[in-house]
Amino acid sequence: MSDLISVIVPCYNEEVSLPFFYKEIQKVISHMQERYPVEFELLFVDDGSRDDTLSIIKSFASKDPKIKYLSFSRNFGKESAILAGLEHATGDYVALMDADLQDPPSLLTQMYETIKEGTYDCVGTKRVDRKGEPPIRSFFARCFYKLINKISKTSIVDGARDFRLMTRQMTDAILNMPEYNRFSKGIFGWVGFKTKWLEYTNVERVAGSTKWSFWSLFLYSLDGIVAFSTIPLSIASILGILFLFIALIFIIVIIVKTLIWGDPVAGYPSMMCVICLLGGLQLFSIGILGQYLSKTYLEVKHRPIYIIKESNTAESYK
């Protein structure tokens, strides 16, 4: 009996990359079908692209029955596109990969061979370097992974890509987490299951430019920290206790100096420094609380995570 492999490809303004990707994935599919009894479905998720991405996907679908597509009513973000793909994938095994060929489709053969051994539930990929990335982005990325692995119980591998092949059991486990604020790298780690990591050298985009700016990556990292750690919530309490202790020490020092040596109490400049310091710490702590409150607010509204405008499958929203 043949295995069905669903390959989910989130797309946002990828008109220049798609022809290269389709040609490459077709080679991999042909190669795998010569060696194994496998069938494929290619599920393209158009995340509200503003170029001809959807038209190109439709042209592929008109000639290739393996291709399914979902097109959002607007740009909902890559996390929503990943979720939509997972929910509409019907395969025994489910793969995620980008259309820009930074995720080499050729690794899919090795991933399938590994997962069929039965030892692993997921075969993921990780970059061994960040060649081609701006140094400042690489530095902050490494800092993020170090930080989140220290403050979170969920292990998130440095350099891990979304590119992976999962069993149906693991896919269903992920779908049982219907949270609105999604951070897939954390979700993949949180559900558990045994993962084998394939390492490869970083590959630059085949065409076009990245859709992730430094600011968008920074906000995405905050989503990850808030979603998978409550440690920042304790910062306000810790700072409050610390500065209460410091304040008590200063009060005692000032009283002793005044009573014994008659020193005058420090004036306006020192007072303003203390006020600014405490004010900044209070705003910082309130900001942390606000982040968690805003995420809770978005969750309880129960808005759709995405809305499908056009598709050759079914369902209009989730």
Image (cartoon, rainbow, N blue to C red):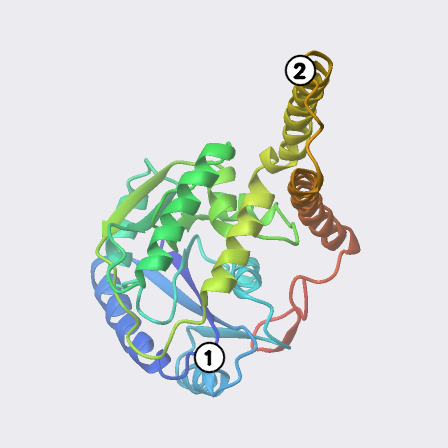
Nearer to us in this view, 253 or 150: 253
Q: Quadrant of residue 149?
A: top left
- Identify the mark at residue 13; answer none if there is no mark: 1
Circle 1: is it few (<14), some (14-19), or many (20+) Cα within 10 Å?
A: many
Q: Give x and y (percent) for residue 179.
A: 65, 50
Residue 99 appears left or right of 225 = left
Vertical position of residue 101 compared to residue 124: above or below: below
- The answer to whether residue 10 is seen in the rendering is yes
Residue 310 appears left or right of 26 = right
Quadrant of image for the C terminus: bottom right
Nearer to us in this view, 142 or 158: 142
Q: What residue appears at the point 43 percent right and 41 percent down from the top-left corner?
A: 156
Label 2 SS: loop
Circle 2: is it few (<14), some (14-19), or many (20+) Cα within 10 Å?
A: few
Along the polypeptide, which appears first: circle 2 or circle 1?
1
Q: Residue furthest front?
A: 262
Q: Give x and y (percent) for residue 309.
A: 64, 78
Q: Which residue is mark 2?
A: 261
Q: What residue appears at the point 36 percent right and 53 percent down from the top-left corner?
A: 1
Three-letter amino acid code at disc 1? Asn
